[in-house]
Image (tube, rainbow, N blue to C red):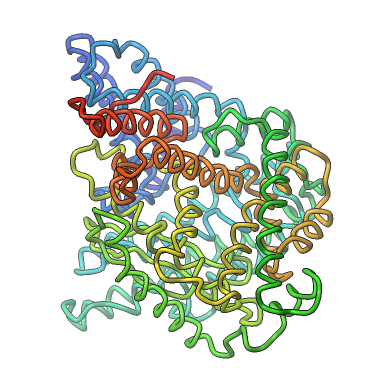
């Protein structure tokens, strides 16, 4: 194909999807100017470019962040779009290598290390065909698109015109996604067949006969009074017509493809390492998610040790309750006794909101800095609740006028025990994800690029560490809730064993489910959902426990070094004060802080470690 033909094809693709892309002129302008700048200005320019590139390449993410100007677009999921973004990423990496980092001031050292490390890891990942796995029961357009549409500004008729423009381009995104799935099918790169059973239902749930019931058009049922009634009807009629003519046929064709071709042809083997070059691919995912150099075998051994330790604590609590029976009998009692379950979904949600409110009043004792952005507690949407995990957090955005949300699952109430609710709330809301992510968003002294970075080892490690703070917050006062907290700790320890077991050591799905059930009070439904999650997100679940262990290790080190001068509020503020970090850079930052604190306590003039200061190790 000629260069002109490729250019015309790319232009047609972008026009169809409205996909945002960084133009070559924007890159050339920045790169041409870099040699004329000093190291500090080079880094600033490259950070600015990277931030703009992320927002314009991934408009859905930009919507959540409140970034303006791209709300009428979707990411270009064509192969041309994917290759263009890869090449642009390689060019940014090359540019970062030409920055003389030794000439950067202390407050930019961390910025440089993060930018370079992120770009390098991303480019290393290009050797693996992740793009051929665009959809699973856990993520993909059927899960993400409704959230993006419903997070868009909805204050004026102009906002709804933008929403319609994005909706109009949705069928092209569906078609692009299907093409990637088709290529993956041909190359035997798919999620395991057993995990895809709910996927057709997830897709069809988006396109009911009545457009007013579609999650895709929820915004058109919530139009503000500031829009005149006549305008509302006009906008709604356009949305309904577009829905029936363009949107429904595209999604229906995708559902039929999944049912007819994708599921029957999907790989049966559940081990990710059975994929082409699977051992190296899995090892990359492990390193990328955990931001450690640990091997799958090392992580497996850590998991076994943690399971043994936590099991001992659980046995102690069983004795404390006076229960007559073994561990298996006690967990069966927790899973089945009606006293531990709500019979009404609204009662369950009120229970979560009560816990959240009680936690909020205790936070100043543990944190010197709290976020200004509020959060809410809502049920997981019905179209995804069946195959969704117990809960999750969705970040808010002050720029977009949207609070953070702790989503709790109300599906199948007999699988939602009361004894897990305190630990879950601490993890997903405060002082877990909402506190950490909102604080990062509100930091004005770091580059916007830093405020939106997400390192699973840090973010999820903090969430799990936060569960241990429940004791300081007045939670876990009865033995069942305390057992629930240990169940959640065990849950993440088991992950280390079963994720590596299934993907590295030859375990099958049934072995993983059995091991999970033998060491946890989680109901079978939750365990099955969790195991299937690890099958389609290999390596991701390892980050929780490893991140928690690293934070606990840093806290123990600070308590030992600082003794009576240890201040838990100062420790937490420092830990969170630079936003999310890879675990290797977090450790270097906290080591520098401890040295500075120790020097100050000893009467030596202490130089406080700035936000960007890290050691070279």
Picture quadrant of residue 566 = top left
Q: Is residue 356 above or below residue 396?
A: below
Taking the image as drawn, is residue 373 in sight? yes
Identify whether 166 is placed above or below 524.
Answer: above
Residue at the location (45% across, 64% down)?
Answer: 470
Q: Where is residue 103 in the image (x, y as percent from the top left)?
A: 23, 11
| Viewer can see residue 257 | no
Quadrant position of residue 182: top right
For this rendering, which residue is in front, 20 or 446?
Answer: 446
Q: Position of residue 362 (x, y in %)?
A: 32, 68
Query: Residue 319: percent from the left, percent from the top?
Result: 71, 72
Q: In this view, does 312 lie to the left or right of 447?
A: right
* Whether residue 340 is situated above or below residue 384 in the rendered picture: below
> What residue is shown at x 66% (from left), y 56% (from top)?
310
Q: Nearer the viewer, residue 604 or 237?
A: 604
247 relative position to 227: left or right: right
Q: How many labels does the image show?
A: 0
Q: In which quarter of the image is the C terminus?
A: top left
x and y percentages locating residue 430 in the rendered image = 38, 63
Q: Residue at x 72, y 39 (%)?
A: 301
């Amino acid at each position: 194909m000629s260069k002109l033909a490729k250019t015309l094809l790319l232009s047609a693709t972008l026009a169809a999807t409205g996909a945002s892309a960084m133009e070559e002129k924007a890159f050339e302008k920045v790169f041409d100017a870099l040699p004329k700048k000093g190291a500090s200005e080079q880094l600033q320019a490259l950070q600015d470019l990277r931030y703009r590139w992320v927002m314009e390449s991934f408009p859905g993410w930009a919507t959540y962040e409140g970034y303006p100007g791209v709300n009428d677009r979707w990411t270009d999921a064509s192969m041309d779009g994917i290759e263009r973004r890869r090449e642009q990423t390689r060019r940014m990496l090359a540019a970062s290598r030409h920055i003389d980092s030794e000439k950067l001031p202390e407050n930019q050292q961390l910025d440089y290390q993060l930018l370079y490390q992120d770009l390098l890891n991303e480019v290393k990942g290009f050797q693996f065909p992740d793009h051929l796995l665009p959809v699973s029961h856990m993520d993909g357009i059927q899960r993400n698109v409704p959230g993006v549409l419903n997070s868009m500004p909805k204050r004026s008729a102009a906002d709804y015109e933008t929403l319609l423009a994005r909706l109009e381009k949705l069928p092209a995104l569906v078609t692009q996604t299907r093409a990637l799935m088709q290529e993956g099918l041909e190359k035997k790169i798919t999620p395991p067949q057993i995990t895809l059973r709910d996927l057709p239902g997830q897709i069809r749930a988006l396109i009911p006969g009545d457009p007013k019931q579609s999650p895709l058009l929820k915004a058109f049922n919530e139009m503000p009074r500031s829009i005149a009634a006549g305008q509302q009807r006009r906008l709604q009629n356009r949305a309904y017509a577009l829905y029936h003519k363009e949107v429904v046929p595209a999604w229906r064709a995708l559902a039929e493809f999944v049912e007819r071709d994708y599921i029957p042809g999907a790989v049966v083997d559940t081990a990710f390492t059975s994929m082409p070059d699977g051992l190296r691919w899995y090892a990359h995912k492990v390193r990328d998610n955990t931001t450690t150099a640990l091997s799958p075998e090392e992580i497996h051994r850590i998991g076994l040790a943690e399971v043994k330790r936590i099991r001992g604590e659980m046995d102690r609590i069983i004795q404390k309750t006076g229960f007559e029976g073994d561990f298996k009998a006690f967990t069966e009692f927790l899973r089945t006794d009606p006293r531990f379950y709500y019979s009404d979904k609204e009662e369950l949600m009120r229970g979560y909101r009560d816990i959240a409110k009680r936690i909020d009043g205790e936070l100043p004792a543990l944190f010197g800095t709290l976020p200004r952005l509020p959060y809410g507690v809502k049920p997981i949407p019905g179209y995804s609740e069946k195959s969704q995990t117990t809960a999750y957090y969705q970040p808010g955005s002050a720029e977009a006028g949207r609070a953070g949300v702790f989503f709790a699952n109300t599906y199948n109430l007999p699988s939602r025990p009361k004894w897990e609710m305190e630990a879950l709330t601490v993890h997903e809301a405060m002082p877990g994800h909402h506190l950490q992510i909102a604080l990062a968003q509100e930091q004005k002294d770091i580059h916007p690029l830093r405020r939106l970075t997400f390192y699973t080892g840090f973010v999820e490690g903090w969430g799990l560490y936060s569960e241990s703070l429940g004791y300081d917050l007045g939670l876990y006062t009865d033995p069942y809730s305390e057992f629930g907290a240990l169940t959640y700790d065990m849950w993440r320890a088991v992950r280390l064993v079963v994720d590596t077991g299934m993907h590295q050591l030859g375990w099958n799905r049934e072995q993983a489910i059995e091991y999970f059930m033998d060491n946890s009070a989680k109901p079978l439904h939750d365990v099955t959902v969790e195991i299937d999650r690890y099958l389609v997100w290999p390596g991701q679940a390892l980050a929780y426990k490893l991140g928690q262990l690293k934070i606990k290790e840093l806290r123990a080190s600070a308590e030992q070094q600082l003794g009576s001068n240890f201040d838990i509020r100062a420790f937490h503020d420092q830990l969170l004060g630079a936003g999310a970090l890879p675990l290797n850079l977090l450790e270097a930052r906290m080591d520098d802080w401890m040295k500075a604190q120790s020097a100050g306590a000893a009467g030596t003039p202490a130089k406080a470690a700035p936000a960007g200061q890290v050691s070279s190790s």
